[in-house]
Amino acid sequence: MNPRTLNPSMSSLLAFEASARHGSFTRAAEELSLSQSAVSRQVQSLEELLGVALFDRIGRHIVLTEVGRIYSLEVAGALARIRDATVQALAFRSGGGSLHLGVLPAFGTKWLLPRMSDFYAKYPEILVHIHSRVGTVDFTSTGLDAAISVGDGLWHDVVAHKLFDEELVPVVGGSSDPQRYKSVEDLCSAQLLQVAARPNLWLEWFKMQGSKHGRLRLGPQFELTTHLIQAVSSGIGVGLMPRFLVKDELANGTLRIPFEALSPSGTAYYLLIPPHKANHRPMAAFRDWLISQL
């Protein structure tokens, strides 16, 4: 087989990967600072080289074919590894580097960011770019170097460093009637506010308490925990929160815990790193610093 077929040009691969990610030649062209026709030609030349169609053209829209979808996953991962290798080489040259970290929004706001000044004091040459992510992180498609997520520890294809266990507590507004909620059973009739990413959290919590509740009054869902905290503070309903996320609100009286209950959730917070990035110099520095904060 002609070696050229197995080694497409970098420009054609970049054009294809950006087009696949955006689903648009125009948006790919904007990202790559090229014309739309130039990107289209690069993708077309790649298709001719491979002898397969990577996109179906439907009017002005493009949709990945099945072989295109599979190829895009592999190409995206390969380009990410090339970028990572380049960043590492530059980091050794300059003594610094950078990393892109995905974090749960509330974790970033309430726990990580207040501590980052300490990291920069120790490692002023390393930049940590923080991206909010809810749910499972796909390192291949996002280009992230690491993520902080909550889970049961059954992670696959990543290096996982456990940070701390999650401790869940029921919380109500600070101005709510102290006599209203004194036990787990008192919450059965309350409006229970939820985080959209964890819709079964209240059901699991009541089961952990050994409660033989009837039908719960599940209230509105919120995508962000910070919004849920505000809703509980405003008296809309009762929330179930990791204790560390509401430490400030508990201290200033905006929220209060109506009664103590069994609090472990069986989940914990983890730093997740793709194996090929575990020894990345900025990553190693951030990992060691993060663990030292615990």
Image (spheres, rainbow, N blue to C red):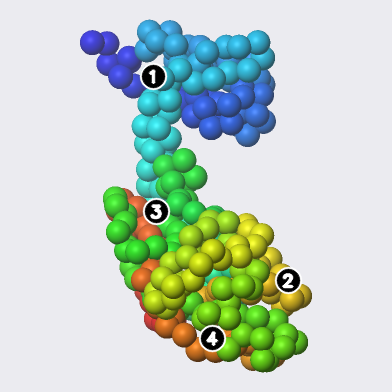
Q: Are marks 1 and 4 in contact (CB under 8 Å)?
A: no
Disc 1 from disc 2: Cα separation? 50 Å
Disc 3 from disc 4: Cα separation? 54 Å
Which quadrant would the N terminus be assigned to in this image? top left
Disc 1 from disc 4: Cα separation? 57 Å
Q: Are marks 2 and 3 in contact (CB under 8 Å)?
A: no
Image position, residue 116 (x, y; %): 55, 75
The answer to which quarter of the image holds residue 31 is: top right
Q: Are marks 1 and 3 in contact (CB under 8 Å)?
A: no
Q: Which residue is mark 1?
A: 67
Q: Are marks 2 and 4 in contact (CB under 8 Å)?
A: no
Q: Earlier in the sequence, mark 1 or mark 4?
A: 1
Instruction: Between label 1 and label 4, give the one nearer the viewer.
Output: 4
Q: Dot 3, crowdedness within 10 Å: few (<14), some or many (≥20)?
A: many
| 290 with respect to 129 (left or right) | left
Disc 1 from disc 3: Cα separation? 32 Å
Residue under the image location 34 percent in, 53 percent down: 274
The amino acid sitting under disc 2 is Ile
Residue under the image location 58 percent in, 18 percent down: 62
The amino acid sitting under disc 4 is Ser
Can you see residue 265? no
Can you see residue 274? yes
Which quadrant would the C terminus be assigned to in this image? bottom left
Q: Which mark is residue 236?
A: 2
The amino acid sitting under disc 3 is Gln
Residue under the image location 52 percent in, 58 percent down: 199
Q: Which mark is residue 88?
A: 3
Q: Which mark is residue 183?
A: 4
The answer to which quarter of the image holds residue 133 is: bottom right
Instruction: Between label 2 and label 4, give the one nearer the viewer.
Output: 4
Q: What secondary structure is found at the residue carrying circle 1?
A: helix
